[in-house]
Image: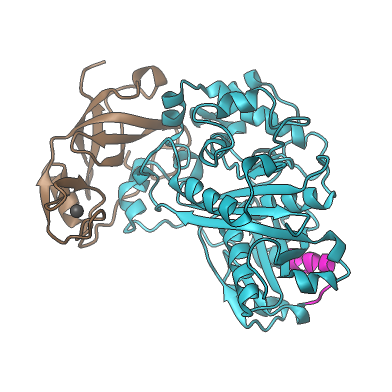
Amino acid sequence: MPGPAPAPIPETLPFWEGAADKELRIQRCTPCSRHYFYPRPFCPRCGSEEVEWTTVSGDARLVSYIINYRPFPPFDPATPVVVALVELAEGPRMMTNIVGVAPEPENLELDMPLKAEFIEYEDYTLPVFAPAVAR
Amino acid sequence: MTSMHRGGIAVVGAAETTGIGVRPEMSVLGLHAEAARNALADAGLTTADVDGVATAGPLAMEVSHHLGIEPRWLDGTLVGGCSFMLHVRHAAAAIAAGAADVVLVTHGESGRSRVGVAPWAPNPASASGQFETVYGAQAPYSTFTLPALRFLHERGMTREHLAQVVVAQRSWALNNPRAFRRKPVTVEEVLAGPPIAYPFTRDMCCVVTDGGGALVLTSAERAKDLPSGDRAVYLLGSGEAAEGPLVSQMADPGSFAAFRKAGAEAFRTAGITHADVDHLMAYDAFAHVPLYMLEDLGFVGRGESGDFVAEGNTVKGGSLPMNTNGGGLSYTHTGMYGMFAIQEAVRQLRGEAVEQVQDVDVSFVQGVGMFFAAAGSLVLSRHRG
Ligand SMILES: [Zn+2]
């Protein structure tokens, strides 16, 4: 059951179009040689507009998480959701869901390697992450 | 020349709504008005004396017009629950600059009964709407809580430390008739409570209440001549800072930059050290937040916050009495709790608290806003410095 749908804006559309193609696309600042997130038409670190969209590896590690036992509709209120903070191999961190394991603390070891997956809903595709090594 | 800090500005009126907790008969604006009128009565002033109004939630002119005030100074800074710390700081600057003489800061929220409250409607096009809400970070308990496991993990701390915060704060609320949660609890009971968002159980999350509070500020010079003058509380220092609206984009999930920056500025402007602080109000929407504050403000070293609380330093007779009204976890939490943290600091400094700590000369009040987005710090004293 999906959560509330995102409403892409011009600055973020390439991220969501990438997700629809099952690719994780984020921006990279050329002068800084660094990726950044969330999408903006300039680098939040140095201010440069010399930035480009890149497709990243989808490799990440689990930084932190909560298990939301009381999600609101449109989530199924009876199904716990793992809300996670992950760090991409390229550096930026993002919020996501952890899928592919039961939502129990014993399945969610901090720093464990993760791999991006994509869940297709009717109106959009959502990047999520699953353990890189089957547990 | 009046100075913004070091005792140039005084809180001359401070009051909460007459009733607190469950107020189904009162709207949001009604709670603002009740608190404001109580605070003005406390100061010995009337609305005719007020020329500055600051609030968060309703617009400042909604509050001023409702009360019959014609302001020449307005502040609608809205950075979440610590907005009122910023209002006090901004009001002090305004009074020192001559832009206002008497400022009224109001808060009121019908967090529990939701009387006259607009339905919750997140913007799906905002950064948080696109990159956080979609993943189930919909409520404070599923957003503000997200970095906590990292904080604990990096320090070798556990969920027991979160539960210890709850137990410590509950101890202050047991005899407070205005506190929402008043039953004694043990660490085991807290951990066994209804799960809300692992690692958080119910009692590690704040209460949800109705209520309000208000403050009246003016120059220390003018305070001397007021009937409330001998109960005046002085602003020694303050600070404010922000990181960003996305908890997922904190520079360091195990430490909040805005606590470090706002806190350091408050200490610096007040000209005090940690040893000078007799009492701490550490905005506790959730049990991990005071632990961050104790470390980020420098009251304890990195990784020491959990044991500091567990060893009894923040309860009655401890070295740093903290959240002596019971805090957001036990006393009240209308949605933007910061006003209540300030109110308790003022009560302690005046010697009028339910659980009065002996000889409180300096109280440090640390606020947080919109999860880990913004912070405001106040150093208050019963002496002019
Ligand atoms: Zn750059």
**Residue B35 is one of the magenta-drawn residues:** yes
Query: Residue B370 location, x and y as percent?
Result: 49, 52
Residue drawn at x 73%, y 60% is B234
**Front position in the image: B117 or B247:** B247
- Magenta range is B33-46
**In the figure, is residue A41 to the left or right of B186?**
left
Residue A88 in which image quadrant: top left
Residue drawn at x 26%, y 55% is A44
Q: Main secondary structure of the magenta part?
A: helix
**Residue B372 is one of the magenta-drawn residues:** no
Give the image's coloring scheme.
Answer: by chain
**Front position in the image: B77 or B193:** B77
**Front position in the image: B348 or B150:** B348
On screen, B116 above or below B347?
Answer: below
Chain B rendering hue: cyan
**In the figure, is residue B170 to the left or right of B46?**
left
Chain A rendering hue: brown
Tell me the quarter of the image containing the C terminus of chain B. Answer: bottom right
Tell me the quarter of the image containing the N terminus of chain B. Answer: bottom right
**In the figure, is residue B208 to the left or right of B121?**
right
Residue B280 in which image quadrant: top right
Residue drawn at x 66%, y 22% is B311
**Front position in the image: B257 or B96:** B96
Query: Residue B158 location, x and y as percent?
Result: 51, 21
- Let me know if residue B21 appears in the view: no
- Let me know if residue B358 appears in the view: yes
Query: Residue B233 location, x and y as percent?
Result: 76, 59
